[in-house]
Image: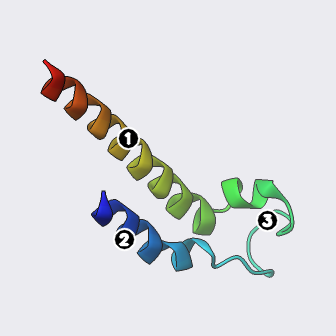
Amino acid sequence: MKKIIGLSLWLAPVASLAHGGHGETDSSTILHWFAEPVHAVPLATIIGVSIFAILHRYYRSIKNND
């Protein structure tokens, strides 16, 4: 779990590269985060790793209880 938190903290600056002047959508809307690859790829990666970590921990706890 410490590795996941560390990785998330390490990736946070990458996801915070929001600035005006790139992409097709207005940079002040939430759509910008989901529509522009510069933001969508790191966001999807962080969400995917988080879901994987939660499910992995859940299934590991079920296996240990059996």
Of 26 and 46, nearer the camera is 46
The x, y position of residue 28, in whole percent, is 86, 67
Q: What is the secondary structure assignment of the residue under circle 3?
A: loop
**Lower sequence index among marks 3 and 2:** 2
Q: What is the secondary structure assignment of the residue under circle 2?
A: helix
The x, y position of residue 12, in whole percent, is 53, 73
Q: Which residue is mark 3?
A: 24
Q: Amino acid at mark 2?
A: Gly
Q: Say left or right for 60 vs 33.
A: left
Q: How is the image coloured?
A: rainbow
Q: Which residue is mark 1?
A: 54
- Residue at horizontal 76 percent and vertical 61 percent from the top: 32
| Image quadrant containing the C terminus | top left
Q: Amino acid at mark 1?
A: Ile
Above or below 66: residue 51: below
Q: Report crowding for label 2: few under 14, some 14 to 19, many 20 or more residues within 10 A (C-alpha).
A: few
Is the residue under label 2 in contact with that under label 1 (CB below 8 Å)?
Answer: no
The x, y position of residue 48, in whole percent, is 43, 47
- Residue at horizontal 31 percent and vertical 64 percent from the top: 2
**Of the two numbered discs 3 and 2 in the rendering, the one whose residue sits closer to the viewer:** 2
